[in-house]
Image (cartoon, helix red, strand yellow):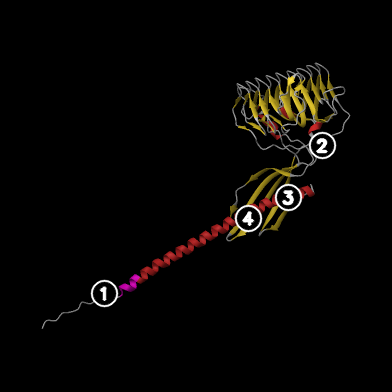
């Protein structure tokens, strides 16, 4: 009888397979737990970093509130707030008033697993405004004008009127005198809270902004953007000052002012007269108008008058910039006017006759320039403050990197 043997089958293979599967699952589980833990830590770090930013911002806002309550506020250290702490440093920046600008440094610290999230915010706060960011800007809204004809000049009922064959461009006096070939740029931005009218063959090397409409004649060139129906720009009012002084310069005579602040009722310069400056000069023209002047001028300049000395950053003239629109005053400059400086008069109507040149900036209620007039916006005037009584506000903020550690 034949017999058949049964071969021995391998034993323990299932155990090995199970162990291998369990090892793989264990490795996968450990990996997933590690990833989950890392993601959780990243989320915590991000949250702490965001908290640090908000805490540093809160520190700046608290500093502004404290400064408005007490200008002598000097900062604070390790103040607890929102799960962290902040420190504020208050540093003085020279300004144009007795209440100087402040550099605020807000530093925050928020604890997080394995370290601390920190943030630092720097901001410049001041009670003054820096409005000279325009070659020319007319502040009055549309429809609040008085006469359609002014001493033979057709008013056309526009808030900013740039005469024919004119030029508006820019330069930086910090880099030298104006030079159309070597020190000339395209930041000659102009605008109005009402209408802007640009007469024929005028070249604007910059942007044009109007709160209402923009009107262009034939041959007008605008190299930048044109924006109509734009949001209005706001400008601070300057409180009136009291004085009995006046400034008159006879025809073809020259007067020089040394560095300082001057307050006059009015300026009256004859043909060919010059008013030069030696150092930084601020002139407040407060009114009432020139006696016997039926049109109510507070500034009346004859033909070929020069105001200021290069660079234009040395002279600031601040005319009427408060009161209702019905209380405006006129500023008239005859043909051939040369102005090196900045003019701020939010309730002043400015008339500049033909073939004049401005090296600086003009902010006024309304602005009308004659044919051939050139405005060379001096970019350095953007750093000039207009002093007024107000509360501290942030003018400039600079952010630094947030570093969790």
The mark nearer the N terminus, 1 or 4, is 1
The mark nearer the N terminus, 1 or 2, is 1
- Image quadrant assignment for residue 196: top right
Please, what secondary structure does the residue beneath circle 4 have?
A: helix
Q: Is residue 254 left or right of residue 312?
A: right
Please, what secondary structure does the residue beneath circle 3 have?
A: helix
Say which of marks 2 and 4 sits in front. Answer: 2
Residue at the outermost left position: 1
Residue at the outermost right position: 244
| Residues at circles 1 and 2 in contact by the CB criterion of under 8 Å | no
Residue at the outermost bottom position: 1
Q: How far apart are the two marked residues, 4 and 3, measured between alpha carbons? A: 18 Å
Label 2 neighbour load within 10 Å: few <14, some 14-19, many 20+: few
> Image point 75% across, 35% down: which residue?
386
| Residues at circles 4 and 3 in contact by the CB criterion of under 8 Å | no
Please, what secondary structure does the residue beneath circle 2 have?
A: loop
**Mark 4 — residue?**
51
The mark nearer the N terminus, 3 or 1, is 1
**Which image quarter is the C terminus in?**
bottom right
Q: How far apart are the two marked residues, 3 and 2, measured between alpha carbons? A: 26 Å
**Which image quarter is the N terminus in?**
bottom left
Bounds of the magenta span? 12-17
Q: How far apart are the two marked residues, 3 and 1, measured between alpha carbons? A: 82 Å
Could you say which is closer to the camera, residue 357 or residue 308? Answer: 357
Label 3 neighbour load within 10 Å: few <14, some 14-19, many 20+: many
**Mark 3 — residue?**
63
Q: Position of residue 321 (x, y in %)?
A: 78, 33
| Residues at circles 3 and 1 in contact by the CB criterion of under 8 Å | no
**Mark 2 — residue?**
239
Label 1 neighbour load within 10 Å: few <14, some 14-19, many 20+: few
């Amino acid at each position: 009888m034949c017999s058949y043997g049964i071969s021995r089958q391998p034993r323990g293979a299932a155990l090995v397979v199970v162990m291998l599967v369990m090892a793989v699952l264990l490795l996968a589980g450990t990996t997933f737990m590690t990833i989950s833990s890392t993601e959780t830590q990243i989320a915590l770090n991000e949250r702490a970093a965001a908290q640090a930013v908000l805490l540093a911002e809160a520190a700046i806002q608290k500093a502004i509130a404290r400064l408005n309550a007490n200008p002598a506020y000097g900062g604070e250290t390790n103040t607890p707030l929102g799960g962290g702490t902040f420190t504020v440093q208050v540093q003085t920046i020279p300004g144009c008033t007795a209440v100087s600008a402040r550099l605020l440094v807000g530093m925050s610290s928020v604890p997080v697993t394995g370290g601390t999230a920190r943030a630092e915010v720097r901001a410049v706060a001041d009670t003054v405004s820096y409005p000279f960011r325009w070659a020319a800007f007319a502040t009055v809204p549309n429809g609040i004008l008085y006469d359609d004809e002014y001493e033979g000049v057709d008013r056309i009922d526009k808030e900013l009127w740039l005469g024919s064959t004119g030029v508006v461009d820019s330069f930086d006096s910090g880099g030298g005198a104006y030079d159309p070939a070597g020190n000339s740029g395209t930041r000659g931005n102009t605008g109005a809270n009402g209408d802007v009218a640009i007469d024929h063959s005028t070249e604007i090397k910059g942007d044009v902004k109007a709160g209402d409409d923009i009107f262009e004649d034939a041959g007008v060139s605008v190299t930048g953007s044109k924006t109509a129906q734009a949001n209005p720009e706001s400008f601070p009012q300057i409180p009136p000052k009291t004085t009995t002084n006046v400034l008159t310069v006879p025809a073809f005579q020259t007067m020089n002012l040394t560095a300082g602040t001057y307050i006059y009722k009015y300026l009256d310069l004859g043909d060919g007269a010059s008013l030069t400056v030696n150092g930084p000069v601020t002139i407040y023209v407060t009114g009432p108008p020139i006696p016997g002047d039926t049109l109510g001028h507070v500034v009346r300049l004859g033909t070929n008058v020069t105001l200021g000395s290069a660079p234009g950053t040395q002279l600031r003239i601040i005319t009427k910039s408060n009161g209702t629109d019905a209380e405006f005053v006129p500023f008239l400059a005859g043909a051939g006017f040369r102005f090196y400086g900045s003019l701020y008069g939010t309730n002043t109507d400015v008339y500049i006759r033909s073939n004049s040149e401005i090296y600086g900036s003009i902010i006024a209620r309304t602005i009308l320039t004659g044919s051939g007039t050139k405005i060379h916006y001096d970019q350095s005037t953007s750093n000039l403050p207009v002093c007024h009584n107000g509360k501290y506000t942030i003018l400039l903020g600079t952010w630094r990197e947030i570093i969790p550690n």
